Image (cartoon, grey):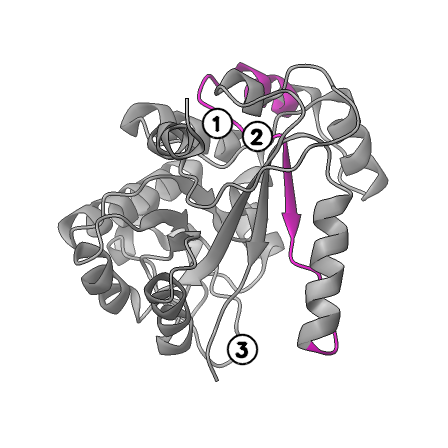
Amino acid sequence: MTNATRFRSIATIFSACLCVFITTDGVSAETWAERLGFDADKKVIIIHAQEMGLCFETNDAVRQLFEQGSTCSSSAMAPCPWFADFADWSRAHKDADVGLALTLNSQNSHYRWRPIGRDEQVRSLVDQKGLLWPTLMQTTVNADVAEVEVELRAQILRAQLDGVQPTHFTTQLGALYTRLDLTRLYLGLAQEYWIPAVVVELTPEQIERFREMGVPLPEDLAVAIQEYPLPKLDDLQFVPSGATYDEKKQRLLELIDGLSSGITSVEFYPAVD
């Protein structure tokens, strides 16, 4: 099987648009890369652009990346003001990998958005101005899971009506991992629509890593993720920050060099000036 054929296979099932193969020194336990047909000693890297639909500047950055031949994965936020603009572009570029970032927060101080669901159906998701909560804590404390489901289904429907057929789901700011009932809803919608959700395989090493980061994982949450049947990531990382382009590039290369074998999604937030 050629690399191109392998790429099309994983893209169909898992939403990958850029796969980079790098040999590592050792062979670890079976990874999701192996389960999807890649060699045990390969790093499979998905470059994933976040926050499409947020504004013109984010949309235009991804358009330029694709038009310049830099294939990457992306996800768009349906409640945001510039989602329709990105949907127009997506309809004309069927080969582009576009997922849906299920959105429960409007985190910017002076640039915010409302839910898509009708006001009376999503009251627990908004502040006194009718805007989605700005912080994860507010969403975690106030959100009613039934109202979250109404809103997420409305976002999926809006995407479909706008001609976007999401290749994957993500959770904006990780909001759907803050409570077990929200995580179960997230994973359940992925299975119902048969659209893979971005989920990291919880190996003992990953669980320990999260604990070291101050993110304890309740046992029930770990079980829910382990029982989720669709393809998962072996790891998730973010493009490091840097004072200059060259510094950022060097830190990214060092991050990639230090990855273990398996499927890793590397997240970034592109925008033009």
Q: Which residue is mark 2?
A: 180
Looking at the image, residue 256 lies above or below residue 68: above
> What amino acid type is highlighted by mark number 1?
Arg
Q: Is residue 225 magenta?
A: yes
Asked which quadrant contains residue 25, the reply is top right
Asked which quadrant contains residue 220, the reply is top right
Mark closer to the chain start, 3 or 2: 3
Task: State yes or no: discs 2 and 1 in contact (Cβ < 8 Å).
Answer: yes
Callout 2 crowding tier (Cα within 10 Å): few <14, some 14–19, many ≥20: some
Q: Which residue is mark 3?
A: 109
Residue at left 64%, top 20%?
40
Q: Is residue 241 visible?
A: no
Residue at left 60%, top 32%?
200
Q: Which residue is mark 1?
A: 184
Residue at left 37%, top 70%?
64
**CA distance for labels 3 and 1:** 30 Å
> What amino acid type is highlighted by mark number 3?
Ser
Residues rendered magenta in the picture:
221-244
Instruction: Give SS at disc 1.
Output: helix
Query: x%, y% of residue 148?
Result: 39, 43
Callout 1 crowding tier (Cα within 10 Å): few <14, some 14–19, many ≥20: some
Pick the residue in front: 195 or 266: 266
- Looking at the rendering, in which quadrant would you find the N terminus? top left
**Residue at the bottom extreme?**
273
Q: Is residue 88 visible?
A: yes
Task: State yes or no: discs 3 and 2 in contact (Cβ < 8 Å).
Answer: no
